[in-house]
Image (cartoon, rainbow, N blue to C red):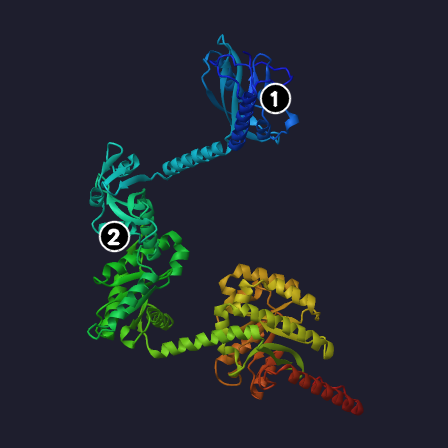
Amino acid sequence: MTPSKPARLGAPSPHTPSAPTPSSPAPPAPTASADESSRLTLERYTLAAAATNEGLYDWDLRTDRVFYAESWKALLGYAEDEIGTSPDEWLSRVDPDDLIWLQATLDAQASAGGKPFQIEYRITHRAGHVLWMMCRGIVVLDDDGEPIRIVGAHRDITDRKNAEEQLRLSEERYALAAQGANDGLWDWHVATDQLYCSPRWTAMLGINGGARTSTMEDWYAQIDGEDRPRLRAAVDTHLAGGSAHLEEEVRTRHADGAELWVLIRGVAIRDEAGEAIRMAGSMTDITARKRAEQQLLFDAFHDGLTRLPNRMLLLDRVGQALGRRRRPEEAQFAVMIFDIDHFKTVNDSLGPLVGDEVLCAVGARLDGARRSGDTVARLSADEYGVLMDGVLDVKAAVDAAERLAMAVAEPLVLQNGQEVVMGVTAGIALSGSGYASAGDMLRDAGLAMYRAKTSGRNRVEMFDDALRERALTRLRLESDLRHAVEGRQFRLFYQPIVRLSDGSVAGFEALMRWFHPQRGMIPPSDFVHLAEETGLILKMGRWALVEATRQLAEWQGRFSPDLFMSVNVSGRQLMEDDLVAVVTETLDAHRITPGTLKLEITESLLLDDPGRCLGIMEALKRQDVKLSLDDFGTGFSSLSYLHRYPIGTLKIDRSFVRAAGESDRRSAIARIITLLAQALDLEVIAEGIEKETEADFLRGLHCQFGQGFYFSPPLPKEAVEELMDARSREREALAGLSALRGLPPKGR
């Protein structure tokens, strides 16, 4: 027998699957009925093979030819005439890794004594994909016991093999997932109350001995007493069909006594009647997660630096106190806000690490001085809040706040050995005012604290209704101001600046006016400070600069190319906005005579950041922009400003102008400023001139320019143009009259 050898192609074997068995005697001479019986038998085999979708084969070992049934060929995707009779038609298509085992199985049949065999292997389909085949067969022996044929059938078991592989992968995936999740597994047989616990389960609880079997009551006994009823109820509910699955977080105890948090999951297996017969699931150690959640919860309601309660926790406790206050027997309480005085100086001079040390020390002192039951919280950088229960009246609240302030004011020795003394300013709001929300109390205590700050630090202030009204007014004004910026409610007015020598208009100062839809015109004194605080001054100032420059270009073309325009620049514009770039872009868009745009700044700006101010002013000077020092003499005037900074004009404040001609010593200041400017070749503009005597006094000092209501109030664009047209007509008339008299015309 040589089934593993390459076979020669030839005619199919005459033998059929109905051939005699190895022990069959020689058949008698065929008769008609015998032929019919053989035909029926063959037909039955053929139909049976077709019904089972198996491919039959018959290998004649003497001729080394194989009969392949049509169904065998169809299994591999071939037609009847596409497969010959060679064994190679079969063996050459078997996967090389499986061919060795198939050949060994076939070779072994020579000594198998005609016993059936079965083997599974892979074979290639005509389309190129691989099929799994189950080959079954039996060796036919001759009278001498020698193998002469191998007869059998093939069945396509690809679907079964794929299902087995998927099952194997699923089981492997589940095992890996369980191992990767590091969960303990449990299986409870409800009827017998036997609870199986996996080795990981017992290891999780610190119990030696690997897997064990116990009862549900043993398990319940290990659960924390507070959580046990909840777990028991959840299990009973699931067994009764009240939930789709079991999932509970409970506390249990490790063998060493440590508390563990575990997540119990499970699902019931039910019989045909829906009764739970088993329940299986897992136990996950979630102690780390729970501790992290507790830490996150603590961090959410406590300050990270001082570990004191934060604003959210204080608001919650104030809200609870307000709820209790609705009961008539409850005494009133106070909310206090403490702000550290001059903390920015400490932080800037000694560094943020020392600043943090001071913040922690102040918080610790407030917390140490509070009464039991009171709450001290850190609200922001250098602000602390205190909730104080059982406050009898205003005096008791003020006394308590002063006591806390005194505790903070004790000298503090820092880690570097340096000693500092910190003071606090406090604001108080009492619950007796009928508050509805904790936020309102905190807000009002803050308003009282801010009033104490502005009135002088290191003091305590009580909140009153006037504070709230001022705050609401400011809030409304800020809201209206934001709408005004977006809604183009601002207009520029222009106050003429005249030459005192002849009264001719030399230029203008652009002044912003706010036209409110309901309140009408609002003067700058009511909104400029608020615009500075909110940062809206940047957008407003940029618009004013562009609009004033555009108007100047128009008037220079219409009236005189020598006209100049003064525009006020705020501190935030100079230090925060890219003023040089804005000016450059504006001058590129609106062509004016070089040197006719003047920017007015105040002395206080030069004190904030002298080096940066100098750089900006030098860059503006290179753009042919003149700089004026406004309100000179009213601040920390220093002669060093005049030679260090590129200033071209000094403006005398109106307070010195009003003293002109009187015995007031301030008039001497105006004289000195004028003489100083003349010595340094600087222009001088006196503002706020309202009387002829003031103008005459300044004219006598040889002050070049003046502005004020004596000459003209700030005017809208149309009024300015009417004024300039009238002056032009007046000059023309004077020129004509002078020509008749033979006299030179006056500048007026």
Q: Residue 407 is drawn in which quadrant?
A: bottom left
Q: Is residue 420 above or below residue 659?
A: above
Q: Amino acid at mark 2?
A: Ala
Quadrant occupied by the C terminus: bottom right
Q: Secondary structure at mark 2?
A: helix
Q: Residue 745 is drawn in which quadrant?
A: bottom right
Q: Residue placed farthest to the front in the image?
A: 32
Residue 89 position in % (x across, y down): 61, 21
The numbered mark at residue 457 is none
Distance Cα–Cα, label 2 vs label 1:
68 Å
Residue matched to label 1: 89
Locate residue 101 relative to residue 236 in the image: left or right: right
Question: In the rendered image, is residue 634 in sight?
Answer: no
Residue 367 position in % (x across, y down): 26, 59
Residue 579 position in % (x across, y down): 59, 64
Query: Mark 2 or mark 1: which is in front?
Result: 1
Residue 231 position in % (x across, y down): 26, 50
Mark with earlier residue (2, 1): 1
Q: Is residue 58 above or below residue 399?
A: above
Q: Amino acid at mark 1?
A: Glu
Q: Secondary structure at mark 1?
A: helix
Residue matched to label 2: 233
Quadrant occupied by the N terminus: top right
